Amino acid sequence: MKWNNKLIGIMAVLMLATTSCDDFLKEEVYTEYDPSQFLRDKSGVDALLTGAYARSRIVAYDSRNYTFLFNEFTTDVSWETGGGLEATAIPFIRFTWPVNEGLLNSFWVKMYQAIASANTVLDVASDLQGLDANTVDLIRAEARFIRASCYYYLYNLFGPTPIIEIPGGASPDQIEAIGQETPRAGKEELVNYMIADLEFAAEKLPVAEEPIGRASKGAALGVLTKLYLLEKNWAKVAETAKKVTDLNYYSLYPDYTTMFSIEGESNKEYIYRAPCIAQAGYQNNYMPHAFPPNYPIQSNWVNFGAQFRTYTAFYKTFDASDERRKLIITNYVDISGKTVELLEDASGKALDNARSFKYLPDPNAVAEHNGNDIVYIRLADILLCRAEALNELNGPAAESIELINQVRRRAKAPEISLAGYATKEALRDFLLEERGREFYSEGLRREDLIRHGKYISGARSRGWDAKDHQVLFPIPQQQRDANKNLVQNPGY
């Protein structure tokens, strides 16, 4: 793979547009500058940081691929047919993805481009002049958060990947060699590397997410919680999740049905998000995939041929009173006035065609380009992480039940009682189901099923010949062709 050096980072600053909804990361226009001085003041480094944030954003088609193709179509929640996407989606749905799958390779490249940008910021920060130590630490904290979060997403998909660091003063040839020769890190090595970055970020970053989309203390602690969850380090999950809630900054948004809309994106539940705007390259383009055929849409919206469908069995896991299921459409009146059923046919046969309208369409969308912010981590996730960790550590107890009930009360779902869950296994199974109901269409289902040991067996129950090793995706063959030291995941 190719690796960015400092010059490429500078050029990117002059070319990249912003990914922010408001004032954050707006690109400065430089008509004249002294290259020798450009990277020695805060404005120059802020511009580099803009590039790192922009590269790290999982929005637009990157979000579609990561959230749905990789992490939800491989599960019991949703699937896809139709349009030009169907041929690409089928291997994920059926567990037949190849080692040279193009979208997996593109995601790998995207994350390493962001890591390279973050490393450039860290390199430049060491030479900054005239800034106090706290300001420099804040710059480093943002860059280390970006770097760690990118490694986290790679780790979630592929397992350990190479740790890339460029020594100061490296020539282009040396940089190229590092990219072509660095082997995969050991699991413990990479996990500890991410932990160190996230702990530094959590210590130095501010609590407030100002403006929206900027790294914060809660975001760093949130990614760290999810990393510990991947590792099943239950004591650290419980401890770090509590650090998030002890910030007393976040709160559950009272109305689940509007939280993911344009109206709801100012909520204090989102901990880590990507700000989106109704503009190509910076958009949330989920809803055009969710509209069923001939659905009555506004003239400024668009309905894709690619159809994202929700399984009937998943819909039926919700209680009738649960507000969360209101965002799953089971029937509609089409533009000709015909009522179309999506859940079951007249005989009760599952149609597996319900539609998640979680990201309610942006009234001011421009064709596929919706401005709904895309959430990666929110408070409900942290509460359920702690509940799961406490159950694994101590079995069912009052605190775990109350954490779950906080989430269920918001959804107007019936509360559960400690008396109803006598064993750790019973509450564990309920938590997995509850996380499905809470986080559908957010790209968390695959990792949850893997953690609970039900990912491969679930695929087999849907009729697919899934293999045990497919809990990880293959290291993209394109990367192994470029770097002969990249060892493939077992089974591929």
Image (cartoon, helix red, strand yellow):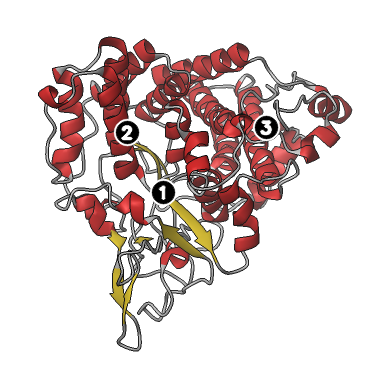
Q: CA distance from mark 3 to mark 1?
A: 35 Å
Residue at 57% across / 32% down in the picture? 471
Residue at the outermost bottom position: 336
Q: Which residue is mark 3?
A: 116
Circle number at residue 77: 1
**Of the residues tagged 2 and 1, which is closer to the observer?**
1
Q: Residues within 10 Å of mark 1 (few under 14, many from 20)?
A: many
> Amino acid type of disc 2?
Asp
Secondary structure of the residue carrying tag 2 is helix
**Of the residues tagged 3 and 1, which is closer to the observer?**
1
Q: CA distance from mark 2 to mark 1?
A: 17 Å
Residue at the outermost front position: 347
Is residue 116 shown above or below 366? above
Q: Quadrant of residue 148?
A: top right
**Which numbered disc, 3 or 1, marks the residue that appears first in the sequence?**
1
Is residue 313 shown above or below 156? below
Residue at 54% across / 24% down in the picture? 144
Q: Quadrant of residue 393?
A: top left
> Amino acid type of disc 1?
Val
Q: Which residue is mark 2?
A: 381
Q: Quadrant of residue 387?
A: top left
> Amino acid type of disc 3?
Ala
